[in-house]
Each structure stands twice: as structure tokens, then as C-alpha cells.
Image: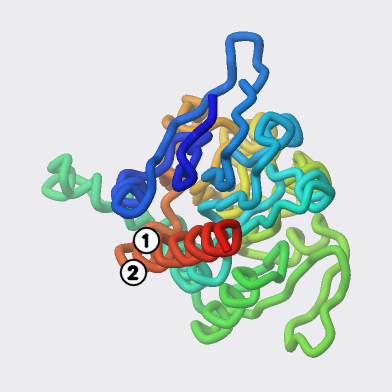
Amino acid sequence: MISAPDTVLVVTPVPKDLRDALSTDYRLQDHARAADGAWPPMPGIHVALTTSMAGADAALMDALPDLRLIACQGVGLDKIDLKAAEARGITVAHTPDVLTEDTADFAIALIYAVSRNIVRADQFVRAGRWTSERMVPSRRVSGKTCGIVGLGRIGETVAAKAAGLGLDVRYSGPREKPGVPYPFVADVAELARQSDFLVLTCPGGPATQNLVDAHVLEALGPDGILINISRGSVVDEAALIAALKDGRIAGAGLDVFAVEPQLNEAFLAFETVVLQPHYASITFETRKAIIARLQSAIAASFKKTNA
């Protein structure tokens, strides 16, 4: 099947606002794997639209021999085969900078939501319990230690916001970053041991698979809180559920999960856990900026192709 030259191939479900915006200028065509898992070949396609969660593998690129651009909604590129794209001369456009501030704000919000029992207290009032019960105490935030795993754009912004709120910030990562005003702790378990809040802002992928395991959670300890705004794959969920069940950590704020949206139902039972629907970057302002960034990348690609 040969598509019209202004076709954008949509290889995974994308938000309605993005579809609506792109459909004013382009013909959107949905594309999915065949029953055997293979991508049906489609010559004539110059632009494919995906998300960070879905990515794009070499098999998809092989099925689209005329592909020139992979437009990706999201920051993470761990599910896009970048080596395969480079080998085929395919440009990859994503939306990193526009997400940074809102995602970092959300990490701070989760710290407060979990430590100050904000969601739990809201439910307490709505259930009519305030008239006959006393809400359990919460945990102070200011003056505590915030350990950040992954000091990229989002991690650095979380660090600055946390420091501004009076937290003692330190970080871990593949290597120490020059010019950073926070102490570097090479070992994640040691960082957890030093931290009241362990905030995950690192990339997903094989290098960070189950980085936060039972050993790290044990180091975080019964007064520690885990915040994950990175990827669900970074946390060993079975170990996390066990640690929460046994009270070996104080709580967690989770915006990402190993499987989405079908998260492990065991999380629903914990009052000390705040659950979010991969929501950290979803503000009106960021959605507008993401759409504009992808529109610009797609328009530039078609202009180059048609020149």
C-alpha cells in the first residue's frame, strides 16, 4: 500500500489533542502489527508518530523503507532503536525540554502528597471520619534529605526546587557531573541510606532495569519515601510491594509502573502510597508546547522531503 505524500503514520495510540492538531494539516493513518507480531510493509511513508512508552524498533523501520522522521511524544528514547535509525538516515524528534518544569514540579508535589498525607487526609474528610476520629500525624519535609537518582534536565530541576524548599540535596548517576553544587553518591543504595526522599528521574532501559531493588529499599528504611517519575522498569515492583507491606519503607509516590495502565492491584491497598496515571507532564501549557514542537518537526521534515 502506497500512502499519500502528506500521510503521518500513527504507530501507537496518541492523545486526542495531538491527533486533532496534526489532522488539520496531515492525513493520519493508524498502523499496527499483524497477528504474527510483524509490521506490515508500507512504502511511501516519510513520517511516523509514536510515544516514548511505545517507541520504534528496527523492524518498524524496515517495514517503512521511505521513513525520514520518527516524531516521538515524550522525553525517553530508550524504546527507540537509535542505532537503527541512524543507520537508515532517519531523524528522531522528541519533546524533552518542554516537559522539564512541570515534571519536576510533580516530583515535589508527590513528596508533599506522600509525606504530609495530603491525599489520605482528603479521603479522611470525604469519608466523614473527621467528626469522630483524629487524623494520624504526617512527616515534615523541610530540613530533610532528598536523594536524586539521575541528574539530567529533570533531575537538576527537581534538585533546584528541592534545595529552594530547604532540603539537603545529593545525587547519584553514571558519573559525577562537574559544576554541580550537590554531593555525588556513586552507589544508589548508599544514596538511599542517606535520604529521606529518594526521587527517581533517571532514564529507563536495560542499564536501569530494577535499579531500585530490595537492597536499595532496605537502605531507604522505614522512614524513607520513594518517588518515581522516571520509568516503571527502574523499580523492582515485587520488592517494592513487599517493602510497603512489611513497613520497611514509609511510603511511595508513583507516577509510572512496570505495566501501564494495568498496574499491579496490590498497590491499591496501601494508604501510604499516592498513585498517579503517568501524569507528571500533563498540563495545558506543556500539552500546547509538545504539540507545537512535533508540528514544527513534522513540517520541517515534509518540507525537506518535498524540496
Q: Give, as a three-letter code, the residue at label 2.
A: Glu
Q: Is residue 23 visible?
A: yes
Image color mode: rainbow
Does 150 appear above or below 85? below
Cα distance between the residues tagged 2 and 1: 6 Å
Residue located at (76% from left, 60% from top): 193
Total tally of numbered discs in the picture = 2
User: Which residue is under mark 1?
Assistant: 287
Q: Which of 246 and 23 is in front in this view?
A: 23
What is the x, y in percent for residue 92? 66, 56
How many C-alpha atoms fall within 10 Å of the one at disc 2: few (<14), some, or many (≥20)?
few
> Which residue is rendered at x = 63% and y = 41% of the image?
55
| Element type where label 2 sits in the image | helix
Give the quarter of the figure containing the N terminus.
Answer: top right
Q: Residue at 40% across / 40% down in the picture?
A: 28
Q: Where is residue 289 in the image (x, y as percent from the top left)?
A: 40, 68
The quadrant holding residue 238 is top right
Q: Is label 2 in contact with label 1 (beta carbons under 8 Å)?
A: yes
Eyeballing the image, is 139 above or below 271?
Answer: below
Q: Residue 230, image x and y in percent?
A: 61, 53
- Along the horizontal axis of the image, is 195 left or right of 282? right
* Image position of 162 (left or right of 134): right
Amino acid at the residue labelled 1: Arg
